Image: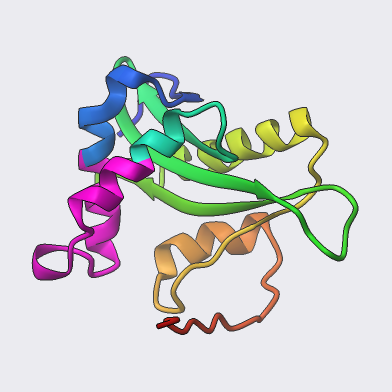
Amino acid sequence: MPAAPVSIRPLQHDDRAVWRDLWAQYNAFYGREGDTALDGEIVATTWKRLMSDEEPVYGLVADLGGALLGLTHFVFHRNLIHIADTCYMQDLFTVEAARGHGVGRKLIDGVADACRTRGVKDIYWHTQLENQTARGLYDRLARNTYFLVYRTDVA
C-alpha cells in the first residue's frame, strides 16, 4: 500500500474520529467488539489521557498524506530492576492494507525515538501467541522473553 513516505507523528486533537475508528479495529482484533466492546467511558477516558500533558500515556499515528494507517499507545513507568523508567508499548495497530509495508516498524521506531528523548532504554510489549503476522515483525526487532502474562480481576 504505502507508495509515498509514511510519517510518524504524535496524536493530535483533530485525529479523534479517525483514532476512535482505528482503536475500535484494534480492539475488534482482540475480540472486544459488539457486546464485548469497550464501554464508551473507557474510550473517552483513554482519549482524554492521551491528550493530557499530565499523564504518562502517549500516542503516535502513521500518517500517509492525511490518511492514518496505524497507531501505537505507550506508557512510561518506573521499573524496579532499572534506575531509569521503562516503556510499555500497550497497543500497536496498522490497517490491514498497510501490513507488510513497514508501517508497524515505523511506529515502533517512533516509540524508540520517544524513549531516547527521555533517556529510556527499554521497551516491552505483549501479543497473543497466535498473532503470527505481528510476531514475524517482533521476532526481527526484539527478543522474545518467553514470559506468560497472567491477569486476575480484583473485586
Q: Across the whole image, how many numbered discs are drawn on residues?
A: 0
Q: Can residue 99 be seen in this view?
A: no
Q: Which residue does the image show at 55% across and 26% down from the upper left?
A: 53
The answer to whether any part of residue 59 appears in the image is yes
Residue 47: image location, x then y, percent: 35, 37
* Camera-nearest residue between 113 and 88: 88
- Give the left or right position of residue 15, taking residue 135 as reference: left
Was residue 126 drawn as part of the magenta stretch in this picture?
no
Q: Is residue 130 left or right of residue 90?
A: left
Is 56 above or below relative to 9? below
Pick whichever, 132 or 29, lies toward us: 29
Res 2 quadrant in image: top left
Looking at the picture, tell me which residue is in the foreground, 138 or 59: 59
Residue 65 placement (x, y as % from top left): 32, 15
- Quarter of the image containing the N terminus? top left
Colour treatment of the image = rainbow
Residue 52 against residue 45 in the figure, above or below: above
Which quadrant would the C terminus be assigned to in this image?
Answer: bottom left
Residue at (57, 43) in percent of width and height: 108
User: In terms of image quadrants, where is residue 3?
Assistant: top left
* In front of the other: 23 or 141: 23
Residue placed at 50% from the left, 66% from the top?
Answer: 135
- How would you classify the magenta stretch by its main secondary structure? helix
Residue interval drawn in magenta: 21-46
Position of 98 with respect to 77 (left or right) is left
Name the spot of residue 69 as percent of width and height, x first: 32, 34
Q: Does the magenta stretch include residue 29?
A: yes
In the image, residue 6 lies at what x, y percent? 43, 24
